[in-house]
Image: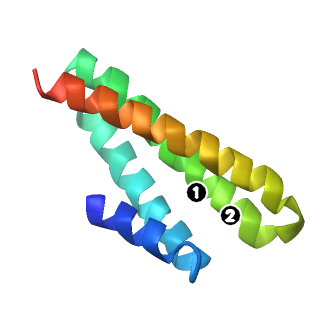
């Protein structure tokens, strides 16, 4: 999954459709994983991660689907990137216990 995220971010500028596909893959893998999580502490951090990656993919699709909305979508991407960092840190804290 980490490789998919890295690939998406690396290719976002040169091949946005590939980046979007990679983010969808990450989002789907996270959704699948989330349904299997039974630990409530982990579930609390995985579900927001699923949401954040879904929002990131949607914002990137906005740019490619409607270039006129690029400024708005870039603002969303920046906000979601911050959310992903936050939930990633939360995940790291929970899983390091």
In this rendered view, identify the residue nearer to me: 61 or 11.
11
Image quadrant in which you'd find residue 35: top left
In this rendered view, identify the residue nearer to me: 47 or 32.
47
In this rendered view, identify the residue nearer to me: 41 or 13.
13
Residue 79 drawn above or below residue 59: above
Q: Position of residue 22 (x, y in %)?
A: 44, 68
Residue 29 drawn above or below residue 44: below
Quarter of the image with the C terminus in it: top left
Q: Position of residue 42 (x, y in %)?
A: 25, 24
Residue 91 drawn above or below residue 31: above
Picture disc at residue 57: 1
Q: Is residue 16 left or right of residue 89?
A: right
Type of colouring: rainbow
Q: Residue at x 42, y 39 (%)?
A: 85
Q: Residue at x 55, y 67 (%)?
A: 20
Q: Are marks 1 and 2 in contact (CB under 8 Å)?
A: yes
Check disc 2: other Cα within 10 Å, few if <14, some if 14-19, many if 20+.
Answer: some
Residue farthest to the right, as pictured: 68
Where is mark 2, residue-wise?
A: 61
Q: Position of residue 50 (x, y in %)?
A: 44, 40
> Is label 1 in a helix, a strand or a loop?
helix
Q: Position of residue 92 (x, y in %)?
A: 23, 32
Q: Is residue 38 visible?
A: no
Alpha carbon separation for disc pair 1 and 2: 6 Å
Check disc 1: other Cα within 10 Å, few if <14, some if 14-19, many if 20+.
Answer: many
Residue farthest to the left, as pictured: 97
> Is label 2 in a helix, a strand or a loop?
helix
Q: Is residue 49 left or right of residue 93?
A: right
Q: Is residue 62 visible?
A: yes
- How many numbered marks have been drawn onto this rendered protein structure? 2
Q: Residue at x 55, y 72 (%)?
A: 12
């Amino acid at each position: 999954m980490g490789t998919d995220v890295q690939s998406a971010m690396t290719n976002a500028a040169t091949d946005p459709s590939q980046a979007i596909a990679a983010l969808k893959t990450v989002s789907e893998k996270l959704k699948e994983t989330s349904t299997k999580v039974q630990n409530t502490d982990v579930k609390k951090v995985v579900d927001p991660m699923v949401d954040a990656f879904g929002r990131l993919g949607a914002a990137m699709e906005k740019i490619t689907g409607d270039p006129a909305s690029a400024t708005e979508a870039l603002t969303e991407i920046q906000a979601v990137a911050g959310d992903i960092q936050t939930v990633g840190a939360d995940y790291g804290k929970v899983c390091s216990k």
